[in-house]
Image (cartoon, rainbow, N blue to C red):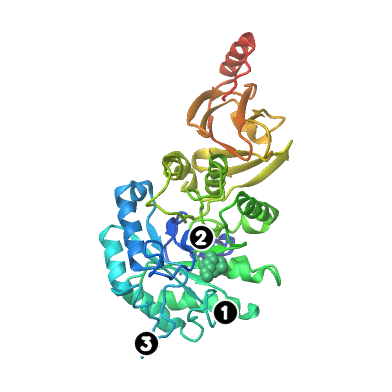
Amino acid sequence: MGAAVLVLFSFCVFISPVRSLDNGLALKPTMGWLHWERFMCNIDCDTDPNNCISENLYMQMANIMVTEGWKEAGYEYVCIDDCWPSHQRDAQGRLQADSKRFPSGIKKLADYVHSKGLKLGIYADLGTKTCGGFPGSLGYYDIDAQTFADWGVDLLKFDGCYMKWNLLGEGYTNMSIALNKTGRSIVYSCEWPLYEWPYHQPDYSAIRKACNHWRNSMDVEDSWASVKTILEWTADHQNVIVPVAGPGGWNDPDMLVIGNFGLSHAQQESQMALWAIMASPLLMSNDLRDICPRSKELLQNRHIIAISQDPLGKQGYRTAKVNNFEVWERPLSGGRLALAVMNKYETGGPRGFPLTLATLPSWKICTPQCNVTQVLPSYKELGIQTLLSKLVVAINPSGTALLSIAPLKGDLKNQWLLWKDVSSRNTHNSVL
Ligand code: GLA
C-alpha cells in the first residue's frame, strides 16, 4: 500500500462516524408486526384459541399482511415475542417451541411466513429466564443463534431480564457475534440500554456496533400517558441518543399501539407522526384481523412511511416547546425537512400554530421559497411559500400536524413579486 493510500485510509477510519453493526441489515427502520403489547403472554389456547400465542396467530397475521395491503405498504417482519417456547430445552440443549401451541414447529412457521414474501422474528433473553419466565439463553448463545438460523428466523428480539446489569454489554455483544457466525441475515433487536440506564449512561457506540436497534425506555402501553412518557424520555435524552441513530442502527421507542383501545384518533396520529420523525422501527402491536379503517389508513399512510424510511436516515428531535405546542424536526434527503407540531393541550378544540420565523426558526428553509406539504391531519399541498407567508396549521388536542418542507431555489425578484402578491391580498392562510 502506497504511503498516500495509507494516509487516506487512516484518515477515513479516523473520521468515520459511529460504526454500525456490519450485517448489512436495517438500513431503514424495520417495519412489521410484533405480538407483545396486544397479545402479551396469553398462553391459554383452550379458552381463548383466537388470541393465544400460537402458530395460528402469526399465520393469520401473515395472511392479512399480504391481503390487506400491509406488505405493500412496507410492513415486512411478523414477530413472535415472549412466551412461545416450551419450558424445557430438547435433548441437544436447543430451545423448542411449545408443542401444543406450535404443533408444526418454528421452522414450518418460518417457511410459511417466507412463502408469503414476509420475514419471521423471534424473541429470546440473554439472562437465565425470559421476562415471562421461559428458558433464557445464558450459556446457550451459540446454540440458540444456530437454532434460530436453522429455523430460518430473520430477526431476533433479545431481552435483558434475569441478568446482572454489568454483564449486559458482554452478553449482547456475544450474541451479536454468535448471530453473525451463523452466516444468516438476522436483524438484531436489543434491549441493552433499557436495562443499563438505571445504573449509568450506556455506551451507545458499543451498542450500535452490536445491534440493529435498541430499546431505551419503558415498555409502551395502550395509553396516551404511556406514549407521552416515551416521547418525553426521548426528548430528554436526545443529545445522547439522536447522534448514534442512522442506517443499520436505530433507537427503538417500542411498538406502535395504533388500532387498539387506548388512543384517540388524534393521539394515534401523534404516535405515527412522531415515530416517523424519530426514525423508529415501525412495529405494530395490534389485531390486524380487527382494526378500524381509519387506524389502518393511518398506519399505511405512504407519506408518513416515506418520512420514516427517508434514505438520509437521520433521526429527528424536539426543537421547541412553545405555548403548549411541541415542535419536532427531522432532516430529510434532498435538503428537505419533516416537521411535527404537537398540541399538548388536552382540552378545548383545535389550536392554530403559525408557521413563521418567530415561532419556527427553521422556517428560514423557505428563503427564498419552499414547497410545503401537510401530511397530517389530512393531506394537503400547501404550495410555494416564502419567509413572509402566514400559514397557520390547526392542531387537535393531543394531535399532531405533520408537514414536509422542500427548499426551492428562486431569485430575489420572484420573492419580491410573491411578497407583493401576499401583502396585497393580506392573506392569513389557514390550513384547517
Ligand atoms: C420486556 C420487554 C417487552 C416484552 C416483555 C416480554 O418487558 O421490554 O417488550 O418483550 O419483556 O416478557
Comparing marks 2 and 3, which lies closer to the viewer? 2
**Residue 294: x, y in percent?**
45, 39
- Gap between marks 3 and 1 measured at Cα: 26 Å
Comparing marks 2 and 1, which lies closer to the viewer? 2
Q: Is residue 10 visible?
A: no
Question: Looking at the rendering, in which quadrant would you find the N terminus?
Answer: bottom left
**Residue 149: x, y in percent?**
35, 74
**Mark 1 neighbour class, 10 Å CA radius: few under 14, some 14 to 19, many 20 or more:** few
Comparing marks 3 and 1, which lies closer to the viewer? 3
**Mark 2 neighbour class, 10 Å CA radius: few under 14, some 14 to 19, many 20 or more:** many
Q: Reply above or below: 67 against 137.
A: above
**Residue marked by disc 3:** 90
**Residue marked by disc 2:** 37
Residue for point 46% across, 81% down: 141
Is tag 2's residue or tag 1's residue first in the polypeptide sequence? 2
Query: The residue under label 3 is which amino acid type?
Result: Asp
Q: Secondary structure at mark 2?
A: helix
Residue for point 64% across, 12% down: 426
Q: Are marks 2 and 1 in contact (CB under 8 Å)?
A: no
**Residue 373: x, y in percent?**
51, 31
Residue for point 38% across, 69% down: 45
Taking the image as shown, residue 372 lies to the left or right of residue 91, namely: right
- Disc ID at residue 170: 1
Is tag 3's residue or tag 1's residue first in the polypeptide sequence? 3
Taking the image as shown, residue 55 lies to the left or right of residue 393, namely: left
Query: The residue under label 1 is which amino acid type?
Result: Glu
Q: Residue furthest front?
A: 47
- Would you say the beta carbon of the disc 3 residue lies within 8 angstroms of ligand 1? no
